[in-house]
Image (cartoon, coloured by chain):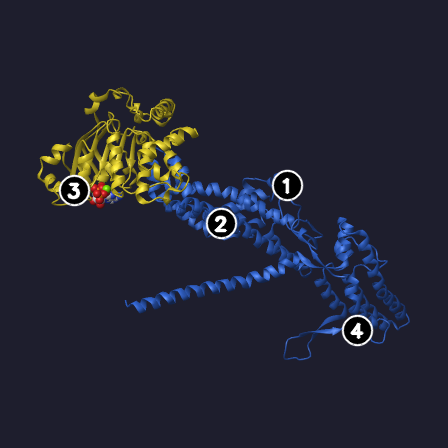
Chain colours: A yellow, B blue
Amino acid sequence: MVESPIQSTEVDNAMNGTDREKSQETASVDKNHNKAPQVTGGKGNNGAQVQDDCHVTTKDFSIFYGDNEAVKKATLSIKARLVTAIIGPSGCGKSTFLRAINRMNDLIPGCSTSGNMIFDGLDIYSPQVDVVALRKRVGMVFQKPNPFPKSIFDNVSYGPRLHGMLKKSELEQIVEQSLVRAALWDEVKDRLHQNALGLSGGQQQRLCLARALAVNPEILLMDEPTSALDPRATAKIEDLISDLRGRYTIIIVTHNMQQAARVSDQTAFFYEGILIEMGDTKPLFTKPREKKTEEYITGRFG
Amino acid sequence: MKLSTRKLLDKSFTGYGIFAIILMACALLLIIVPIATKGIQAFIFRGTIEYRKLRLEKFEEGNLKKVNAELKGSQELRKPIYDMIDQFEKDIRELEYEERREYRKELREVKKSLKELFGPAPGDHQPVLWREQYGQTRWDRAKIKIDQVLFFEEWDYSNPDKMGVKVLVDRKSLFKGTSLEPLFAYVEKHAQSILQPKLVFYWRFLFDESFDAHFFGGIWPEVLGTLYLTLGAMFFAIPMGIIAAIYLTEYAGRGLFISLLRSCISTLAGVPSIVFGLFGLAFFINSVKVSESKSVLAGSLTLALLILPTVIRASEEAIRAVPKTYKEAALSLGAGKWHTVLTVILPAALPGILTGIVISMGRAAGETAPIIFTAAVSVGKPLHFWETLSQPTPALPWNIYNLCTEHEAVDEIRHVQYGMVLTLVALVLILNLAAIILRARISKKLKG
Ligand SMILES: Nc1ncnc2c1ncn2[C@@H]1O[C@H](COP(=O)(O)OP(=O)(O)OP(=O)(O)O)[C@@H](O)[C@H]1O
Ligand SMILES: [Mg+2]
């Protein structure tokens, strides 16, 4: 099996991890993120032929809030370096499922799981997983914008700093790069050192996206990243998503069918916690196999 | 609800709120104004020639020539007083024994009060205590002493239905027809020109040590002691309190032990401070022996224990008030728990934590009971920093109490008490103000 950083304990992660991460980060800075993260080891860099690789697979995966089963025995696989959209009516468990992938649900008391979720060959809910290392590799943009009450610069540089990048020039570069990618740079370049809470809701959401991008994760989870944005910014984010496609695995939750159709390669449709259908986006939208799916995408409910 | 009723309700609520605030402000003024006006008299007062003489002789302060010239004038004016006494003493030698004895007794009283007013008479031997070497240094005290020369108190029990009434009797009447009779008019007339009161700004009151048990000098040892104790208590309580709060909010589970711990902390907040004082003595000094006997260190530790619950509670609440989303954001970027606490949660909680610190700082500065057995002494030198580990110190709250209950001449040094009270209030205010400004700046930074 390929060496898996998320498996390592804190200590040896710190020992063998630092150098590699540093070189990886510097490399990605130098080449403007042109290179895929190498943390996946052997599976990296082989271009098109790994596209079918499954980055995350779940088997009979359920999530409970206390006794309430919010996601019911979902079995699916998310392909590496593609964009996967998750759609479904409100309250069907999309956010819950998304948050399960980087174990953010751990924070919710009473939340538990059953079944398996395999990431990079390892069950991420097995006890030897280092959650911190996992979250480093699985970035997330939350449904509600949640910038830190710090300056814009400090927000974006929080991740890189955390992972050992301390040089000011490097940080400045990565902050600019991330903000440009999140289509926010032009709006904030003159006020980088002002508090992020002074931004509008949509700007805050893009800032959170920039912040997640700055860590250069392998998987990017986005929970309705454009729900608070105007059409122009939305278009920019969609462009960004297509831009990142092929290098990151992106999982995006959206209520916007057109958006799902436009940006995603794969789509999963949840209904009342049950995964109804999952497949390539085009066929799913044109010739859905399930009746529920058809009803939903044609807008008969939800 | 109708619009008019709603408006009326709104208005009456606002009115009530304003009324409450005004009431509180009035009550506060009622306390602050006397403290300020009386306290300031320790710093600004009318000093007599005796004051200038003392400063010159003991501290080599002031203009030698000028003071000597003033003294000379003063002595010339005093001379008739002592001449009159001499004359009177000669006169009464001629009298019958009984009468002589009576006059002698009364004369002794006159001489005593004159000595208190003007200092030792010429030819007296030099006393040891400073307070006996000089007359009244403050004109406000001198005025009282003048009255004591002119009048004496007597209790009037003539009306059997009532309690005795205090009446002032003119001393002159005792010496009617004698050669001493003019003395009283003379003293009344010339006292001011003898003592030559001048306005003094004695800012050094704050930075001088006290001399002769607070009869003279300032309160620096007390101020310094209070600062040491307060900052020492903060030094121990803040890190402990914040770390405990972090543990309770972020790490502790919900077990029986933790809820027991929480109720212990709440109980601790309600324990009377004298109990902390006794505990400090028993634990820090007698058991752990942080110092041989009372010391600033033991006092600080005791005070720290006293304010720890407040710090923990305030910090806990402040940490809980930090939006969960900040924590989620940090964790999702791959921050560890501890790192999240340090870089995101604590900065966001800092204003709230500072509020708790402000409150407890005022408390630590003003508490008397915990330091009685652990740190405070009535008189002492200002300590060097390293001496705080082993030496006790005077401190404002304790010395205020001490001066007004145990000092041998409480009335003589009222101004020192009031000066101390004002200083303590000002000290707490300044410490609080610093913390409040800091908090405002942090809040502003957080809010953007
Ligand atoms: N913290 C929580 N505690 C308990 N139940 C929760 C919690 N969060 C979500 N749920 C429940 O889990 C179910 C799924 O919620 P989830 O937030 O995943 O929905 P969603 O698909 O993201 O909806 P939306 O499109 O409105 O965001 C809902 O029934 C919700 O009530
Ligand atoms: Mg959601």
Mark 2: which secondary structure? helix
Q: For the residues carrying marks 1 and 3, which lies nearer the camera in this image?
A: 3
> Horizontal and vertical percent for residue B167?
70, 74
Residue A101 can be seen, yes or no: no
Residue under mark 3: which chain is it in? A
Task: Say left or right for B53 vs B299.
Answer: right
> Horizontal and vertical percent for residue A12?
36, 24
The residue drawn where x is 61% and y is 61% is: B37
Q: Which disc is residue B436 wearing?
A: 2
Picture quarter with the N terminus of chain A: top left
Amino acid type, label 1: His
* Location of residue B124 by image quarter: bottom right
Q: For the residues carrying marks 4 and 3, which lies nearer the camera in this image?
A: 3
In the depicted structure, whether residue A143 falls above or below residue B197: above
Amino acid type, label 4: Lys
Q: Which disc is residue B423 wearing?
A: none
Q: Which disc is residue A272 wearing?
A: 3
| Disc 4 to disc 2, C-alpha distance | 61 Å
Mark 4: which secondary structure? helix
Which residue is the extreme one toward the right?
B94
| Disc 4 to disc 3, C-alpha distance | 107 Å
Task: Say left or right for A267 vs B281.
Answer: left
In the depicted structure, whether residue B204 falls above or below residue A285: below
Task: Say left or right for A209 vs A261.
Answer: right
Residue under mark 1: which chain is it in? B
For marks 4 and 2 on the same chain, the one whose residue lies earlier in the sequence: 4
Mark 1: which secondary structure? loop
The residue identified by callout 4 is B172
Amino acid type, label 2: Ile
| Disc 1 to disc 4, C-alpha distance | 54 Å
* Location of residue A131 by image quarter: top left
Q: For the residues carrying marks 1 and 2, which lies nearer the camera in this image?
A: 2
